[in-house]
Image (cartoon, helix red, strand yellow):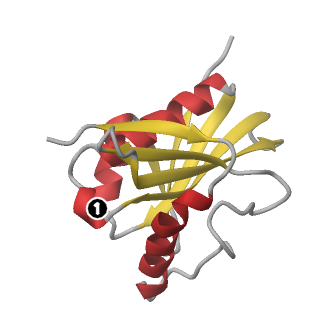
Amino acid sequence: MNEFRVERINHRRDHLADLFNQYNFYRNESSLQKPVLKRMGEPLSDCEPILFIALGNYAESIPVGFIQLYPICSSANTGMTTIINDLYVLPDYRKNGIALKLIEAAVKFAINNKSVLIQLETLQDNLIAQKLFESVGFKCQASDSELNVYYIRFEFD
């Protein structure tokens, strides 16, 4: 049985190119989704993304998944908001709890960063992802488009 760990990557993301390329290929195959980023790990705006990766096989530390976050200051939410932009696990490693570990790392980051909200969007027909998000405590805010917005609101003293 493989064991996996999640780590935050601060610098030197070039060793993740194969993982990102597989994700970009996966995204390009979807008829609805269009790539938002020129390359994974590049910012959507002027802020640097926060990147957590899942590593398998402790000895080799093989990258098998990632989650990309953007902390932003939101006047609408009167505080920091953490946006989950991408979540991906290689197909051969799915159904091993890796996506759950990545989501949990994102939620922990949001709490430690004093975000009042963590939010993501997913396709309305992505029932597997929706079940995962709801199991961690995300609430769904249905939308008029093909996407549902999921969020957790945090209260701080």
Give the number of marks.
1
Could you classify mark 1 by the number of other residues whose Cα lies within 10 Å: few (under 14), some (14-19), or many (20 or more)?
few
- Measured from the top left, where is residue 77 in percent x and y? 74, 39
Residue ID at (38%, 36%): 5
Q: Secondary structure at mark 1?
A: helix
- The image shows residue 126, relative to residue 62, as above or below, that is below
On screen, residue 115 versus residue 46, left or right, reads: left
Residue 155 in view: yes
- Measured from the top left, where is residue 138 in percent x and y? 44, 41
Which quarter of the rendering shows the N terminus?
top left
On screen, residue 83 versus residue 108, left or right, reads: right
Point out the residue furthest to the top here.
157
- Measured from the top left, where is residue 135 in percent x and y? 31, 39
Residue ID at (67%, 31%): 115
Pointer 1: what residue?
Answer: 127
On screen, residue 134 versus residue 28, left or right, reads: left
